Image (tube, rainbow, N blue to C red):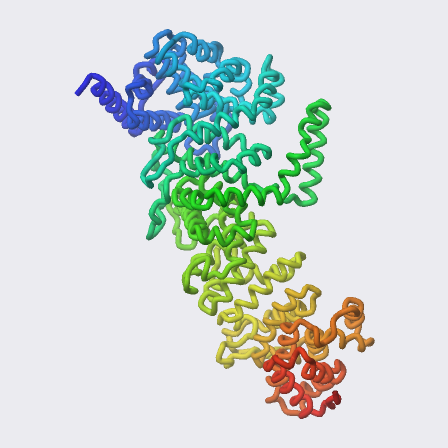
Amino acid sequence: MTSKQETTADAETHLTTLLQELGSSSGLKMSSATAQTQLNPLLDAFSLASTQHARSLAFLVISKIISNARPKDPSTASEKAQTDATTKLSQLFTSLLEPRLSSTDFKNVFPALGLFAALFQVDQATASQILQKDGVMESVIDATDLFHGDEGRNVSQGVAALLSQASGSKSCRPLVASHAMTWLQAQSQITSDPTLRAAAAITLTKLSRGAEEDASATTSSSGSAEPLQEVRRSTDDLVSVMRDLVIGSPPITEPTSSSKSTPQATLDAVEGLAYLTSDTNIREFLSVDSTFLESLFSLIPPPKKRQTGPVPVIDADNATFDSPQQRSSSGLLYGIAVIIANITAYKPQLTEEEKQVEKLKNMTQAGAQSGQELAGSMDPMEIQRETPLYVKRRCRRLVKAGVLPALVSIASRSESESVRRTTGKAFLSLVEDKENRGKVIQAGGAKALLAMIRTALAAREAQSAEPKSAKGKVASTSHQPVRALDLQDLFSIQALAKLSITASPLLVFGPDASSSIDAIRPLGHMLLNPASNLLQKFESLMAMTNLGSLGPVVATRIVGYKEPSLGSILTKAETLLLDDNVLVRRAAMELICNLISSDEVWERYTGEGLDGKTPVVVGRDSNASSAPSTKAVVNRLRIILALSDVDDIGTRLAASGALAMLTSSASVCRIMMEDMEDGPKKAFAILIDLISPLHLEEDDDDDNSKEKQMAGSTGPSPGDLQPQLVHRGVVCVRNILANLNPSPPESDAISNIVRAAETTKLAGVLVATLTAPSSAGNKEVVMAAAQALKWLANHGVKLPMK
């Protein structure tokens, strides 16, 4: 074993021992006076001779030191407790870093730069406080002039990496801008060192993007405003630098490949473009560059083999921190996902209230800007490039360049929550264009989305597990509500819903109905989730309507889906039948119509089992304890009857379709004829309007008919009516009359029905429908109309001659 290997082995041994001591029950007592001796192994881990494993151990040690010093529960800790912990940690690491950063020995300076950058990644607050101490920033910048040759190159790379991390801190950006701007700009032009060039470019990018957010801080810092304006003007140069670095990177061709084969320059370039693509003009520029896009997608390893069995649950209390290699791999995938999501992003549709708030915000910002700055920010071309037409074009370009296999591969590596959410957002933007949806399905996008959703739900279940009881013991989890997914997790579900709306579920999920059952849970969760907006609820309803069309098995599973803390799909759909939004009302009605094939919904709306032996007896006492509430059944039927009479054709089709099925139940027919206000007359008026709305123009005594006359005076003739509405209306009439046959002909109920039929001229409408040209080829309509006319004639209703 060489001396270099012995030193590395010693460093790993010391770090392992240190980690064990930090994790022991007694802990490891440290102070500023003893830190240099105790934490020396940390510095060794960031030397040139160190191994990847040693750096991984170093990150774990840093993380353990931080977690030991900070409050155990950050959510309940006071601000003072956090500030005190930051101060103590700052003192501890300053004693280790400061003397080495000001040294003239390369063996002291280079490891200190690496440790300082790592501290920024683990605890930004502590690292930021150290960098802002007097003389620290000066020592960092001075180090770039102290060394030459290979040592000078390594130190410059270390300084650039440190400044890149520091530029992510709001409190450090003014400091970096005022001390390092000139040096960073010079390094970003050095083509002979891609790693240094990329690190400098990403730092400049972070400063540029943070400039607007930190406007007040940067202008109050002496000499920092002008350099930041200079950075904004050089954005195009930064994009070109990072584009070239991505194009020059070697592709990853093996599923097991990781960031170990990805140069740091590439990682920095991807991170920088993730920042820069928040600019609309840059999105447009990169979207037309097929060479760049193909090179970017080639950096993603091929998909992992799909996992079978239960999703592994992460133990948050005992989880270890990612190694630098894992961090880099996740960072690369996240950066690529952000670039894709940014380029494909549509401008959010704001509500009227949000538009007013945005307008006031813009006015306030405009008042704080000079006329020249305001004019420069209002680029007409940029505004045009944010329109849906331009975004759609960008999405299609990315699809052509191969973005779909890239996203599917990222989705297969969705252990990271941020990667998963960003990938879902990108998928959502791509499926906004219906022309892309078939391509997404062909590329395996639906299965990829389901896999990400499954991981997100499993993570939420793990977070909701083992709640503490009042006495501190672990409570039973069998009935514990699972926490709702965050809004960002719903992007994947919404994308899946869009695919399910426009394509057959058998095409989206698999060749048989049972394969679609896995989609019920995510779609149901989006419907029930309090964070869902109205569009997401609407699309969830539409998607489940498609699933429900697969038959009773899937419909029953949809009806049975419940979440203890959120409710059930069926109850939510019934609530949305009364929503103010026409499209949401329609979607809810369409879903319920498709769910009637389920036993539970049938009983819920008829009050009887499928065998018809437990009918609802409205207005009388029922001894059948299992029968649904009679009032509830009446109210549900009343709502469906009312929705069969609304202006929206889609809602009428769904509601009348549900009635056509439900009126095959004798109890439903009795309810409609005997137990609703003005039952026969009102029901017949609505059904006649389905068959022939023009007929009601003749009935001037009916208040409702006047509204129908105004709305339908220019409507089509009976022969031109929508065949589906006619069919539904005629079937409903036939079912109602046929199911009342057992009643004695002289009963009051039959007399009321006959009078209502005569008043509403039901027979005339049926005769007109029977003889209409559009009915000639529809045997079901002809048969149903003939049966209804026969019943009317048998009960004394005079049929008109046609």
Name the residue at 46% across, 53% down: 441
315 in relation to 736, above or below: above
Quarter occupied by the C terminus: bottom right
- Residue 495 in percent (x, y) is at 51, 50
Nearer to us in this view, 247 or 408: 247
Tell me if residue 563 can be seen.
yes
446 in relation to 320, above or below: below
Q: Quadrant of residue 369?
A: top right
- Residue 563 in percent (x, y) is at 48, 56
Nearer to us in this view, 189 or 612: 189
Q: Quadrant of residue 57?
A: top left
- Residue 489 in percent (x, y) is at 49, 45
583 in relation to 221, above or below: below
Tell me if residue 88 can be seen.
no
Quarter occupied by the N terminus: top left
Residue 610 is left or right of residue 157, and the answer is right
- Residue 80 in percent (x, y) is at 50, 25
